[in-house]
């Protein structure tokens, strides 16, 4: 076991609150878990040396941080500052049918229900998910009543100061036939470490529109997850946009726990310098007639490293499943590295499934052609690369978010050079 994990366990043992049963279980599991090395398949291409060396610490002082403004977006703001929920930034009157509370402020009956659902979707195999179970304190519980359509999205922002450490947790429950959009956003100032996990219970006929923006770069360490449980005829549409950092890791789990559930996942990440980004996506088709469409695209420049592991598991009873996984990658230098592993594990015999992965380099002839037409090399790169990503941006249901992220990605491209 590493010193960092021993320290995390020691800190967790000193916390005594309503989550004590779940925290105790997490501590026990962590105490019997080996620290992952490169021999562990889930961490084969993602070394944890930066975590072991991290000197990020919990910051108790009140720090006035606010989320980056998104033009033309009106949202219900849930803001964590250095791991602590900042209730002063939740300024809007909540619409009827929407409840947002800190777990410690719930009554005993509500806490019992929250305990039953806490960590019920996120698999125990996620090491840092267990760390989050053990160290998260300000757990926010979001509930949408049956049949309620929440017009404004909920924006969950985790903000970190220089050298700060945080462990944030949110539980979201959508009632039958309800509808909700959620934006997850991590913003860090440098040398920080965070684990940010959200679990989504999507009831029958409910619809979830989901976004996760992991745009922190530099010396930050970010390890988190978004986990979904879909019941009968539930629908979800998820979009992930990410840059790399010293270590960025995101685990996504989608469980088709009901019939005719429908899931769409679009992910794009752009890496430069010595950055690392690791996306592990698992889809469990446990019931019949489910559909999954997964598109993942990556562009890696300089000496960056990208990791993608996409697994679709079709259980024996999941007949009539339709599932497709497509991973496309673009290398902009001879020293960048992309490791991709799409997986299909099928036990049903009446399914339609496909998966594939490609890794290619930028078309140098096209680059040369644009330069001969008077277009600078940097602008030519942006033009060629933007089309590769823009297709997924166009699929984002929220137009304001799409227009906000486009110039950010365009600026990112302008900094990445073909080598």
Image (spheres, rainbow, N blue to C red):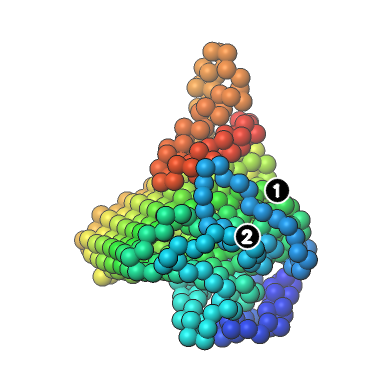
Describe residue 344's horizontal placement relative to residue 260 as left or right: right
Residue 147, image x and y in percent?
33, 65
* Labels 2 and 1 touching (C-beta < 8 A): no
Which quadrant is the N terminus positioned in?
bottom right
Task: Residue at the far front: name it.
Answer: 93
Describe residue 203's horizontal placement relative to residue 412 as left or right: left
Nearest to the observer: residue 194 or residue 160: 160
Picture quarter containing residue 173?
bottom left
Residue 356, image x and y in percent?
38, 47
- The image shows residue 136, relative to residue 337, as above or below, that is below
Residue 34, image x and y in percent?
62, 74
Query: In percent of the image, x 63 and y 44: which residue is there?
Result: 304
Return the disc, 2 or 1, that comes first in the chain's sequence. Answer: 2
- The image shows residue 151, relative to residue 284, as above or below, that is above
Query: In percent of the image, x 59 and y 60: which residue is there?
Result: 91
Query: In percent of the image, x 60 and y 57: which residue is there?
Result: 157
The disc at residue 256 is none
Nearest to the observer: residue 313 or residue 393: 393
Tell me the SS state at disc 1. Answer: loop
Crowding at label 2, few (<14), some or many (≥20) Cα neighbours within 10 Å? Answer: some
Tell me the SS state at disc 2. Answer: helix
Give the label, 2 or 1, closer to the camera: 2
The disc at residue 218 is 1
In this rendering, does residue 110 appear at all?
yes
Crowding at label 1, few (<14), some or many (≥20) Cα neighbours within 10 Å? Answer: some
Mark-to-mark CA distance, 2 and 1? 27 Å
Which quadrant is the C terminus positioned in?
top right
The number of numbered badges drawn on the structure is: 2
Query: In percent of the image, x 61 and y 46: which residue is there?
Result: 69
Residue 291, image x and y in percent?
30, 57
For disc 2, the marked residue is 89
In this rendering, does residue 231 appear at all?
no
């Amino acid at each position: 076991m590493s010193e960092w994990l021993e320290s995390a366990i020691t800190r967790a043992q000193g916390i005594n609150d309503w989550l004590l049963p779940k925290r105790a279980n997490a501590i026990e599991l962590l105490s019997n878990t080996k620290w992952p090395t490169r021999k562990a398949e889930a961490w084969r291409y993602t070394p944890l040396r930066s975590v072991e060396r991290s000197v990020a610490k919990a910051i108790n002082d009140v720090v006035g941080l606010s989320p980056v403004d998104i033009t033309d977006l009106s949202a219900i703001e849930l803001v964590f500052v250095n791991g602590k929920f900042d209730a002063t930034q939740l300024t809007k009157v909540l619409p009827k049918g929407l409840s947002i509370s800190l777990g410690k402020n719930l009554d005993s009956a509500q806490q019992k229900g929250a305990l039953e659902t806490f960590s019920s979707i996120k698999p125990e195999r996620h090491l840092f998910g267990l760390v989050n179970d053990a160290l998260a304190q300000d757990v926010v519980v979001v509930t949408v009543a049956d049949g309620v359509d929440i017009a404004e999205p909920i924006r969950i922002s985790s903000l970190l100061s220089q050298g700060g450490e945080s462990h944030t947790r949110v539980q979201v429950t959508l009632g039958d036939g309800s509808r909700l959009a959620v934006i997850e956003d991590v913003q860090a100032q440098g040398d920080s470490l965070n684990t940010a996990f959200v679990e989504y219970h999507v009831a029958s006929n409910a619809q979830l529109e989901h976004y996760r923006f992991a745009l922190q770069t530099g010396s930050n360490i970010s390890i988190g997850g978004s986990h979904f449980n879909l019941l009968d005829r539930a629908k979800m549409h998820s979009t992930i946009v990410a840059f790399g950092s010293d270590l960025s890791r995101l685990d996504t789990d989608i469980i088709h726990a009901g019939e005719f559930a429908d899931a769409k996942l679009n992910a794009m990440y752009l890496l430069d310098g010595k950055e690392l980004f690791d996306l592990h996506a698992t889809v469990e088709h446990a019931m019949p007639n489910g559909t999954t469409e997964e598109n993942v695209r990556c562009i890696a420049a300089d000496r960056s490293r990208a990791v993608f592991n996409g697994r679709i598991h079709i259980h024996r009873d999941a007949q009539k499943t339709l599932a497709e996984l497509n991973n496309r990658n673009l290398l902009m230098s001879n020293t960048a590295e992309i490791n991709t592993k799409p997986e299909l594990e099928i036990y049903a015999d009446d399914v339609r499934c496909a998966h594939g992965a490609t890794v290619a380099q930028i078309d140098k002839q096209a680059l040369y052609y644009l330069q001969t037409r008077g277009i600078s090399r940097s602008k030519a790169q942006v033009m060629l690369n933007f089309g590769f990503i823009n297709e997924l941006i166009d699929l984002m249901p929220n137009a304001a978010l799409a227009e906000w992220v486009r110039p950010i990605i365009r600026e990112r491209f302008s900094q990445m050079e073909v080598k």
